[in-house]
């Protein structure tokens, strides 16, 4: 099977805006009021301007508001592709292959590779790389050509290869298990990479397409004593970052040597400059005020902005009316309670199941989730086409059904049987946002109904919270993680004993077997069946208690274009070269 990009062009804005009104494959199962509802208060959300009848214009400075990065502890994209690293590097890098937002189907398409071919037995992948692509012309790389050596370096670094990654950082490379199926990587010439697998790997191309596989030059990594990306990013991407002040601003200028053109033959990117100013915490008032006063052009979560509430949307629409438009989408952000199953009392499956049953997910969504959300199983309902439970299916299940009387009674029974009536447990979570504190208080209230007392501990920021998890200093925690278009991210990587994102050291032999089974399925039908089998087991052993998947409402000024309809917070970061502005 061969996959090819016919040219260096990208989909133009005409198709882009037609597709923007369609639900993508990822949110196909969520195409209903919960995924596309207008803001409350009767406000017309506005419509994206019909820019498809005109060619994109070049020039201009797009001013963004982004979340602060220091609180995440890293901007290293190969180490941790969460919001902060994605926001920091997204405009400056490319991947070998990527997920295509503009298509509306979220398929995997060529990026730095111009094509790839898979052998009939599914074990050999041959990537043909684009010729003449150069890294940005800044020290220490100075515009050298991108080659197969850079692909090999990326895969080794993402995998925390000890030749490249110091041992002390290994545990922090959250995608290090992505390429364990590789048996060999060869480079027949500098534009060809051949990867052979030990066995069928249903998620190999998905792993290749995550932004965590962004290609960065080895020179940038090796000039840092810790071999980490800290305050500078260099890539083959559309923008060269010239100024970065952590938690304050990041300014990036157009890369004059960028390799890509649009369908009209226009050199990309369209914009001359990106200016990102950062905000802190969960208070959106400063960001909304900056937007209303004309200091910024977008309030978009998918490109690093805040999670807006219905009240924020209403405020902006009342003042700006038809001067702005709103895009509603499923963020796919996943929120859940996680247990330390190696320590009492949650080494007892009855206690984990009691929490799973006692949590009132709908009350949490209605009370504290800005912008709204929907209940979720281990795999979000947006992936129902791949075997996930739908919202309707979940609402009939123990732990999700309403009213909660039956679940609370069952949870009380389990706590009593486990011998933990009146036990006090500590719940850790990041105190960086008001949502965290409010959710912790509500969980405390809900668990008290079944005889579990909760002592809440808030850390100063997300990185401190993660450090405590890695150091095994917790019993119960609330956390979240970014969206994924593949169920493996939720099933294997977070809960299999060998999963690189299994910070909580959950280990269960039966779960390891079932969660790995979907990785090695040969057909789509076999994989969907294996995913459903894993989800059935999940509700019995409760390695976590899923709560909700959030929704986004993003605001753009009418003279800004090219954003598409994001289906997870990181999608838009792959399309900075397509953003453009009308002269105004």
Image (cartoon, helix red, strand yellow):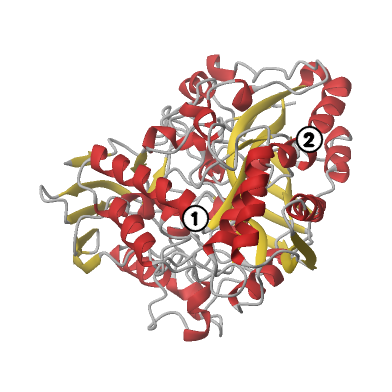
Quadrant containing the N terminus is top left
- In the displayed structure, would residue 320 be above or below residue 271? above
Q: Is residue 151 left or right of residue 339?
A: left
* Foreground label between 2 and 1: 2
The reply to whether residue 266 is visible in this rendering is yes
Instruction: Using the numbered discs, state the Cα–Cα distance from disc 2 to disc 1 in whole angstroms.
Output: 31 Å
Query: How many residues crowd mark 1 within 10 Å: few (<14), some (14–19), many (20+)?
Result: many
Quadrant containing the C terminus is top right
Q: How many marks?
A: 2
Q: Is residue 265 left or right of residue 462?
A: left
SS at mark 2?
loop
Q: Is residue 554 left or right of residue 51?
A: right
Whole-percent x and y of residue 438? 81, 51
Q: Which residue is pictured at 60% across the width and 34% down the height?
A: 401
Residue that numbered label 1 is attached to: 93
Residue 468: quadrant of the picture = bottom right
Residue 303 numbered mark, or none = none
Give the camera-side residue of 156 and 143.
156
Mark closer to the chain start, 2 or 1: 1
Q: Which residue is pictured at 36% across the width and 41% down the height?
A: 108
Whole-percent x and y of residue 133? 37, 54
Give the camera-side residue of 396 and 566.
396
SS at mark 1?
loop
The reply to whether residue 273 is visible in this rendering is no
Give the camera-side residue of 297 and 357.
357
- In the displayed structure, would residue 251 be above or below residue 49? below
Q: Is residue 225 left or right of residue 278?
A: left
Give the camera-side residue of 323 and 46.
46
Whole-percent x and y of residue 426? 74, 69
Residue that numbered label 2 is attached to: 309
Whole-percent x and y of residue 347? 55, 70
């Amino acid at each position: 099977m061969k996959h090819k990009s016919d040219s260096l062009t990208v989909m133009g804005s005409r198709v882009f805006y037609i597709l923007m009104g369609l639900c993508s494959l990822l949110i196909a199962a969520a195409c209903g009021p919960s995924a596309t509802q207008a803001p409350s208060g009767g406000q017309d959300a506005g419509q994206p301007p019909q820019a498809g009848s005109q060619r994109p214009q070049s020039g201009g400075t797009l001013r963004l508001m982004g979340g602060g990065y220091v609180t995440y502890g890293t901007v290293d994209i190969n180490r941790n592709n969460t919001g902060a690293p994605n926001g920091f590097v997204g405009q400056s890098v490319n991947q070998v292959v990527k997920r295509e937002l503009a298509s509306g189907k979220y398929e995997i398409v060529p990026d730095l590779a111009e094509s790839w071919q898979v052998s009939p037995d599914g074990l050999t992948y041959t990537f043909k790389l684009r010729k003449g692509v150069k890294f940005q012309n800044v020290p220490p790389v100075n515009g050298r050509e991108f080659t197969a050596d850079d692909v090999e370096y990326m895969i080794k670094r993402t995998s925390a290869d000890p030749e490249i990654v110091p041992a002390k950082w290994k545990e922090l490379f959250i995608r290090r298990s992505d390429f364990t199926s590789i048996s060999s990587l060869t480079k027949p010439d500098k534009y060809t990479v051949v990867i052979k697998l030990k066995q069928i790997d249903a998620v190999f191309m998905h792993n290749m397409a995550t932004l965590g596989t962004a290609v960065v030059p080895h020179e940038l990594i090796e000039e840092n004593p810790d071999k980490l990306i800290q305050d500078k990013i260099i890539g083959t991407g559309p923008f060269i970052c010239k100024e970065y002040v952590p938690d304050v601003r990041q300014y990036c200028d157009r890369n004059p040597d960028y390799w890509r053109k649009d369908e009209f033959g226009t050199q990309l990117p369209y914009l001359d400059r990106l200016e990102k100013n950062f905000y802190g915490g969960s208070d959106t008032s400063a960001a909304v005020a900056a937007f209303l006063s004309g200091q910024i052009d977008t309030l978009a979560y998918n490109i690093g902005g805040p999670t807006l509430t219905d009240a924020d949307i209403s405020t902006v629409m009342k003042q700006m009316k038809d001067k702005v438009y709103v895009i509603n989408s499923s963020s796919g952000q996943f929120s859940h309670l996680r247990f330390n199953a190696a320590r009492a009392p949650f080494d007892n499956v009855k206690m984990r199941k009691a929490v799973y049953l006692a949590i009132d997910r709908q009350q949490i969504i209605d009370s504290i989730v800005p912008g709204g959300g929907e209940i979720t199983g281990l795999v979000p309902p947006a992936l129902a086409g791949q075997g996930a439970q739908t919202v309707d299916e979940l609402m009939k299940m123990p732990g999700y059904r309403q009213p909660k009387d039956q679940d609370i009674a069952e949870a009380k029974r389990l706590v009593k049987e486990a011998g933990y009536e009146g036990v006090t447990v500590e719940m850790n979570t990041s105190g960086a946002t008001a949502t965290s504190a409010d959710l912790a208080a509500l969980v405390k209230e809900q668990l008290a109904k079944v005889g579990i007392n909760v002592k809440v501990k808030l850390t100063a920021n997300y990185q401190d919270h993660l450090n405590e998890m890695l150091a095994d200093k917790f019993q119960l925690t609330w956390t979240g993680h970014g969206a994924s278009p593949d169920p493996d991210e939720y099933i294997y990587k977070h809960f299999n004993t060998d999963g690189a994102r299994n910070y909580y050291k959950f280990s269960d032999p039966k779960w390891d077997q079932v969660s790995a089974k979907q990785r090695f399925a040969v057909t789509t039908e076999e994989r969907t069946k294996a995913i459903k089998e894993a989800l059935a087991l999940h509700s019995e052993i409760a390695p976590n208690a899923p709560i909700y998947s959030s929704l986004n409402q993003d605001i753009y000024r009418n003279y800004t274009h090219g954003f598409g309809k994001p289906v997870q917070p990181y999608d838009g970061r792959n399309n900075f070269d397509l953003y453009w502005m009308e002269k105004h």
